[in-house]
Amino acid sequence: MTTHYIDITLLPDPEFSQAHLLGALVSKLHRALVRHGAGDIGVSFPKHVDAPPSRRTLGTVLRLHGTPTALDQLMTQAWLKGMHDHVQIAGTRPVPADAQHRIVRRRQFKTSAERLRRRRMRRKGETAEQASAIIPDSVQREPSLPYAQLRSISTSQPFCLFVEHGALQPTIVGGRFNTYGLSLGATIPWF
């Protein structure tokens, strides 16, 4: 149950963009949640903007949700090393009693028809022409969700972590969160 929260706010920086700092913060949080391993800490981005692609952003605030014990265990790790000059951390606070709830989840998209064709060629032993006949350009999608730009720890490949803030709902849904703090079906308080 996510009864408390901590806000981590990105500070303006002349050397690094907000997007760069948010990506670094989310990457550090991911590694800390892997070590934490309990699935009991969720995240949200209360300043996110789901505007047209040129303006979409996760915003400047990363909100951690959990119990006081879970949040304290996370914050006693040195996971924010190197970020202290770039963030302001609020103390652990109780969630307002009148808060609504929503699911905050990761969304993955098949964004590149060319990448899908190359994968099919490797897996099926097909030629480029055969793969193109099976996978048309129309499968390509342009996601309109805000995202954090990250780098895979295992492959070092860059990727976009698309985040969807679901519809508001009046009831709590319990459950676990993944190692990005995103929902596997559980809600977080929204206020």
Image: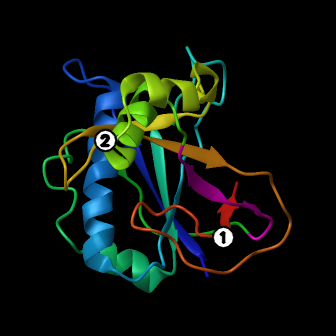
Q: Residue at x 68, y 68 (%)?
A: 187
Which quadrant of the figure has residue 174? Answer: bottom right
Q: x, y percentage for residue 144?
A: 62, 28
**Nearer to us in this view, 15 or 85:** 15
Helix, strand or loop status at disc 1: loop
Image quadrant in which you'd find residue 35: bottom left
Q: Which label sits on residue 150?
A: 2
Q: Which residues are magenta?
A: 97-108
Determine which of the numbered discs, if any, sits on residue 185 in the image.
1
Q: Amino acid at mark 1?
A: Gly
Q: Amino acid at mark 2?
A: Leu
**Magenta run includes residue 99:** yes
89 to 22, vertically: above or below: below
| Residue 126 in view of the camera | yes
| Residue 67 vertical position relative to residue 187 in the rendered view, above or below | below
x and y percent of residue 190 in the render? 69, 57
